[in-house]
Amino acid sequence: MMTEGLFQLIWAHSLYRTGGLFTSSGEEVTVIFPGRLNRNAGPDFMEARIKIGGTTWVGNVEMHLKTADWLKHGHDDDPAYRNIILHVVYEHDGTELPIPTTTLELKNHMSPTVLQRAEGLLQNIGQLPCSGVHHNVKYIVKANWMSRLLAERWEQKLESWNIFLEKSADDWRNLLYHRMAANFGFKVNEAPFVMLAKSLPLNVISKHRDNPMQIEALLFGQAGMLTRTWEDSYPNDLQQEYGYLRKKYQLHPLPEHLWKFLRMRPANFPTIRIAQFAALLQQSVHLFSSVIETQTVKEIYPLLDVTAASYWDNHFTFDEHQKKSVPKNLGRTSVENIIINTIAPIKFLYATRQEQEYNVEQVLQLLETVPPEVNNITAIFDKEGWPAYHAAQSQALIQLYNGYCSQKRCLECSVGLSILKGLQ
Ligand code: SF4
């Protein structure tokens, strides 16, 4: 049951009986500071402070389940392991190491309760291994962990956005265009939307902003959806416009088969999303500066109040006429999805890069005024009595589930650690 990961955690948080520790050669050991866990190559803990036989040492600590693992892991020939101040093993198997190393065995200092709790977490095969136990973890522990998870989620997400800015000499308008396009794909069609934006430069769109039909022609044409002839005049007109614009800008359309329609609600069809994206591009001349200027969700909603061209009132695809005529505006859930996944992160990134601490805080508060996402992951936590009350929490729970719970990384999670420590 004991693993290196669990053993390191027990050491890092002093979850063992700390009194009466002696090295294999009989010297008394007092751990003043266990060291900083090193996740890179080299010894497991750095800058530890350990008193061994009356002398206080400062340096690195290496940990193994058995003494012989030192040799198995090839540390003997590795100069990075010459200055280890303490070799901590779960079980000292009597192996004599060729280089003088002070060895401390901890097997008999383990707390059965800690081990039982760890086993409970690691052997639970449910969707949430801490099911039934997490309720007792202090609110403050969960709240702090959720804040860190949100930061971690955005850090991962914004890495590629930062790269985009660096490569484009801080072209924020273009970044927003590309991210907005990806968001209009709403997961299922995200990849083709990303390709669509890449194939159609923003400056081409900007030149035709005063002509909604040309913007639609550019988008539908580049999406590869204008390659046939139809009964309706609308797609035929778009095709004609696109033929001219394609030649003018030497554009290369995507293959149509990239777009997914299967098992989707018609309101989410890529045709409808492209028409709504076209409407957004047409009506938002200064979208980036408007986004940055907004401070509340109430101010953001009107920016995303877009409706597809009237042809789409009674169509979900070209030529297929619907009896019921309904304007295809971006629904509230879609708007909130865009606020969570594009608007808030870009405002956060902008404030961070401008070192506007106040605005960074404001974006995080803004997310707390957006309703939480409802999806398979938030449903798991909801069922467990751990609901998200706003989008900052649902984002944190998504990060928690994908990055930790589903990968059984309970020992790296603050909730798991709290359960282990018994601070419930
Ligand atoms: S990672 Fe944390 S929250 Fe997720 S199941 Fe494990 S202990 Fe619970």
Image: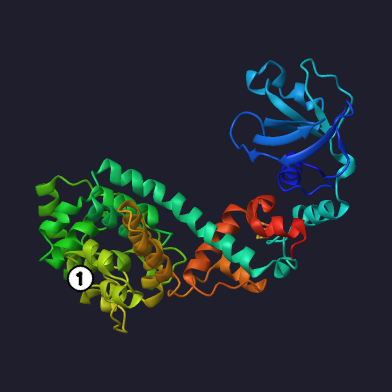
Which residue occupies 63% across, 22% down? Answer: 80
* Nearer to me, 285 or 72: 72
* Quadrant (top left/top right/bottom left/bottom right) for the C terminus: bottom right
* Nearer to me, 164 or 143: 143
* Nearer to me, 183 or 221: 183
Observer able to see residue 194: yes
x and y percentages locating residue 392 in the rendered image: 48, 67
* Quadrant (top left/top right/bottom left/bottom right) for the N terminus: top right
**Residue 90 in the figure: left or right of residue 225:** right
Tag 1: Cα neighbours inside 10 Å, few (<14), some, or many (≥20)? few
Q: Secondary structure at mark 1?
A: loop
Which residue occupies 9% across, 48% down? Answer: 248
x and y percentages locating residue 126 in the rendered image: 72, 61
Does any atom of ligand 1 lie closer than 8 Å to the CB of label 1?
Answer: no
Q: Which residue is mark 1?
A: 232
Quadrant hosting ligand 1: bottom right
x and y percentages locating residue 338 in the rendered image: 37, 66
